[in-house]
Amino acid sequence: MRKPRFDHIGIAVRSIEDAALFRDLGLTVAHVEIVETQNVKTAFIPVGDANLELLEATSGDSPIAKFIEKRGEGIHHICLRVDQIDEHLETLKAKGYRLVNESAVPGAHGCRVAFLHPSAGNGVLIELSEKADELPNVPEDDVEAIL
């Protein structure tokens, strides 16, 4: 198993369209997607070799809606890219780490993802993500409509 690599920081926002700071800094959205299984709209913004992921709830029972209700907008999680998510989850479970997801679930852009409970990450929600294909680029007209 290769070591995990840093992938992105997830930021919970009430509205992706209203998150103007990133646009005003000259950053550009590269990928937007609604993840039905998570009730969330995501916008990925490349920053160097990593990404920021803006997370907007699409329903009141979304984990993001609950997070914002309890804690307000802000950093939701950090994501580590792994090659063999199932093996990583088995290893972590065997070592006694608390998992939010016992097995991988569908995530944005076809990735398989699983979250580790914040108690496993020193108070930080950790997402493991196994990449599918490269992210498609969003046409500039669509990005302008989104942001």
Image (tube, rainbow, N blue to C red):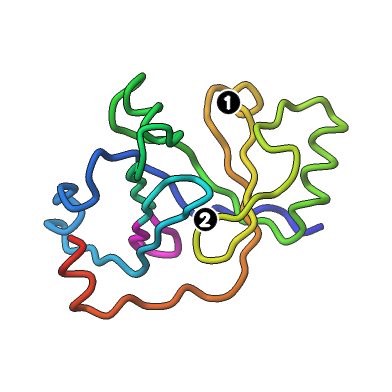
Foreground of the two, 75 or 144: 144
Residue designated by label 1:
118
Q: Give whichever of discs 2 and 1 has the lower sequence position.
A: 2
Residue designated by label 2:
7
Q: Position of residue 50 (x, y in %)?
A: 44, 59
Quote the CA–CA distance across marks 2 and 1: 18 Å
SS type, badge 1: helix
Prevalent SS, magenta region: strand
Highlighted range, magenta? 43-52
Q: Is residue 46 magenta?
A: yes
Q: Is residue 73 magenta?
A: no
Q: Residue at x 46, y 52 (%)?
A: 8
Above or below, comparing residue 9 to residue 81 in the picture: above
Q: Position of residue 125 (x, y in %)?
A: 54, 32
Q: Position of residue 60 (x, y in %)?
A: 36, 33
Amino acid at the residue labelled 1: Pro
